[in-house]
């Protein structure tokens, strides 16, 4: 993987902070105790660690080993432990029907072709009735300087996500502005998208 992410994570502290995004905190309440949860491109572990503390059986992966070292430090001593893997999303084995929920939070490093592969992988790895939970920047974010990719093709609209998960039951969706305070990485007013849908 490009060393850009490693570089970003190599400073002191946690680039996106250690607290989960509000979206993850709110949506975790939907999951049943002991749910099997996958967190895609989990970064420095703020979501993997939080979800494991809620009592879920968490698997998380990321393509930056610098981020993963921090993730493991963040979750050290926690019971239960999230399972952290060093893996590029391109190489991840999407085991069929292995998870009750899959989180993808700020995974907009992916251009449209890779994004389609990730969404297909999520569909494969969720059991029927399982939830996909996506949170990221809306296309309007291009006007802001609070984080996220600068290429509009990487950003989300609700229409894009509805089309990607056509036929799924939409459980929750929102397109809104909020002020982020997530470490140095996400700081200030941001245009955000939430999308939660249930696999048929
Ligand atoms: C904006 S960060 C978000 C991290 C985490 N989800 C969070 O919200 O704190 C994007 C993450 O994607 C990871 N990443 C970028 N390209 C990747 C790839 N091809 N495969 C796996 N992870 C990748 C980076 O290492 C980084 O941790």
Image: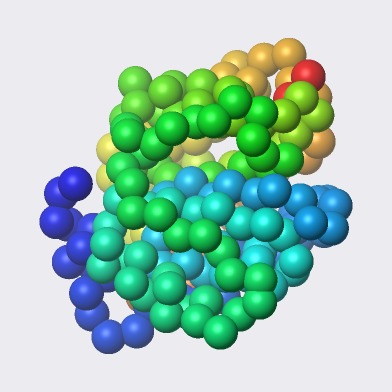
In the rendered view, tell whether residue 47 sits above or below residue 35.
Answer: below
Looking at the image, which residue is at 72% across and 60% down?
Answer: 56
Looking at the image, which residue is at 59% across and 26% down?
Answer: 96
In the rendered view, tell whether residue 166 sits above or below residue 149.
Answer: above
Is residue 105 shown to the viewer in this render? no
Q: Residue furthest left?
A: 3
Q: Work out which quarter of the rendered image holds the C terminus and state it.
A: top right
In the rendered view, tell whether residue 185 sits above or below residue 190.
Answer: below
Task: Report which quarter residue 25 is drawn in.
Answer: bottom right
Task: Report which quarter residue 122 is drawn in.
Answer: top right
Give the left or right position of residue 69, taking residue 33 as reference.
left
Image colouring? rainbow
Residue 92, x across and y down, in percent: 39, 36
Is residue 168 shown to the viewer in this render? yes
Residue 118, x across and y down, in percent: 45, 30
Q: For this rendering, which residue is in front, 122 or 134?
A: 122
Q: Residue furthest top?
A: 167
Looking at the image, which residue is at 32% across and 34% down?
Answer: 91
Residue 28, x across and y down, in percent: 75, 58
Q: For this rendering, which residue is in front, 176 or 170?
A: 170
Q: For this rendering, which residue is in front, 187 or 105?
A: 105
């Amino acid at each position: 993987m490009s060393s850009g992410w490693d570089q970003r994570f190599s400073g002191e502290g946690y680039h996106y902070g250690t607290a989960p995004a509000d979206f993850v905190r709110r949506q975790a309440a939907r999951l049943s105790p002991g749910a099997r949860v996958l967190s895609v491109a989990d970064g420095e572990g703020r979501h993997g660690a939080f979800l494991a503390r809620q009592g879920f059986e968490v698997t998380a992966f990321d393509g930056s080993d610098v981020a993963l070292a921090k993730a493991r430090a963040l979750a050290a001593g926690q019971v239960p432990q999230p399972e952290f893997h060093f893996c590029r999303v391109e190489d991840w084995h999407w085991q069929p029907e292995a998870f009750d929920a899959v989180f993808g939070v700020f995974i907009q490093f992916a251009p449209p072709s890779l994004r389609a592969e990730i969404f297909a992988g999520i569909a494969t790895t969720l059991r029927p009735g399982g939830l996909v939970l996506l949170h990221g920047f809306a296309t309007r974010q291009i006007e802001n300087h609070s984080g996220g990719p600068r290429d509009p093709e990487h950003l989300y609209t609700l229409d894009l996500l509805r089309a990607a998960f056509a036929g799924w039951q939409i459980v929750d969706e929102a397109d809104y502005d909020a002020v982020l305070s997530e470490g140095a990485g996400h700081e200030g007013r941001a245009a955000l998208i939430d999308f939660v849908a249930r696999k048929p």
